[in-house]
Image: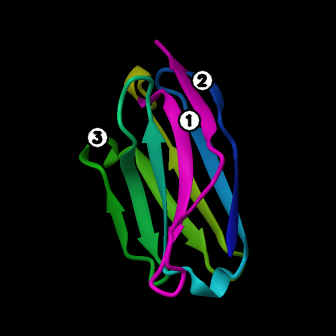
């Protein structure tokens, strides 16, 4: 119903910045919430940040003040600006889209973010 394609991952030194983007296609009108999750090796997938179509945001405590999520509803794009990156931010980052009409949440394929200390 909805397809998500992420871009923008890569390798960066600690203290640096990266910007992730996720473009949704398909039945995008069904999307209510978009967000980013991440999964580090040996750890469970965890929430990073979410944003509703009314631009209400929610952040994990570990990224507050460093990461900013934004959304272009007209283009169905969600972005994550990551500043002051730390080694512990290293993970595969996944885009997520959800909504009552959507039913099952959609996931992107993931993009690797590696922060070297």
Residue 54 or residue 103, whichever sits in front? 103
User: Are discs 2 and 3 less than 8 Å apart at CB?
Assistant: no
Q: Specify few, some or many for label 3: CA neighbours under 10 Å numbering under 14, 14-19, or 20 or more.
A: few
Q: Is residue 7 left or right of residue 96?
A: right
Above or below, 61 relative to 89: below
First of labels 2, 1 by sequence position: 2
Above or below, 39 relative to 36: above
Q: Position of residue 18 (x, y in %)?
A: 60, 38
Q: Is residue 98 left or right of residue 9?
A: left
Give the residue number, with chain letter if any, for mark 3.
Answer: 62
Q: Quadrant of the N terminus?
A: bottom right
From the image, state whether disc 3 or disc 1 is nearer to you: 3
Q: Please report the residue visible at 36 percent of the width from the left and 29 percent of the height from the top.
A: 43
C-alpha separation, residue under disc 3 versus residue under disc 1: 16 Å
User: Are discs 2 and 1 less than 8 Å apart at CB?
Assistant: yes
Indicate the secondary structure of the residue bearing disc 2.
Answer: strand
Give the residue number, with chain letter if any, for mark 1.
Answer: 17
Q: Please report the residue visible at 48 percent of the width from the left and 39 percent of the height from the top.
A: 83
Q: Specify few, some or many for label 1: CA neighbours under 10 Å numbering under 14, 14-19, or 20 or more.
A: some
Q: Residue furthest left?
A: 61
Q: Specify few, some or many for label 2: CA neighbours under 10 Å numbering under 14, 14-19, or 20 or more.
A: some
Tell me if residue 108 is in the magenta stretch.
yes
Q: Position of residue 16 (x, y in %)?
A: 53, 28
Tell me if residue 1 is in the magenta stretch.
no
First of labels 3, 1 by sequence position: 1
First of labels 2, 3 by sequence position: 2
Label annotation for residue 12: 2
Q: Please report the residue visible at 34 percent of the width from the left and 44 percent of the height from the top.
A: 63
Above or below, 38 relative to 96: above
Which region is colored magenta?
89-117
C-alpha separation, residue under disc 2 versus residue under disc 1: 7 Å
């Amino acid at each position: 119903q909805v397809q998500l394609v992420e871009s923008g991952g890569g390798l960066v030194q600690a203290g640096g910045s990266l910007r992730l983007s996720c473009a949704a296609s398909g039945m995008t009108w069904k999307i209510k919430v978009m967000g980013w999750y991440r999964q580090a090796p040996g750890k469970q997938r965890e929430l990073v940040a979410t944003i509703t179509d009314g631009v209400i945001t929610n952040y994990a405590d570990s990224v507050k003040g460093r990461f900013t999520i934004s959304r272009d509803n007209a283009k169905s794009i969600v972005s994550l600006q990551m500043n002051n990156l730390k080694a512990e931010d290293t993970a595969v980052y996944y885009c997520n889209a959800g909504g009552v009409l959507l039913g099952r949440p959609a996931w992107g394929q993931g993009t690797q973010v590696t922060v070297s200390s």
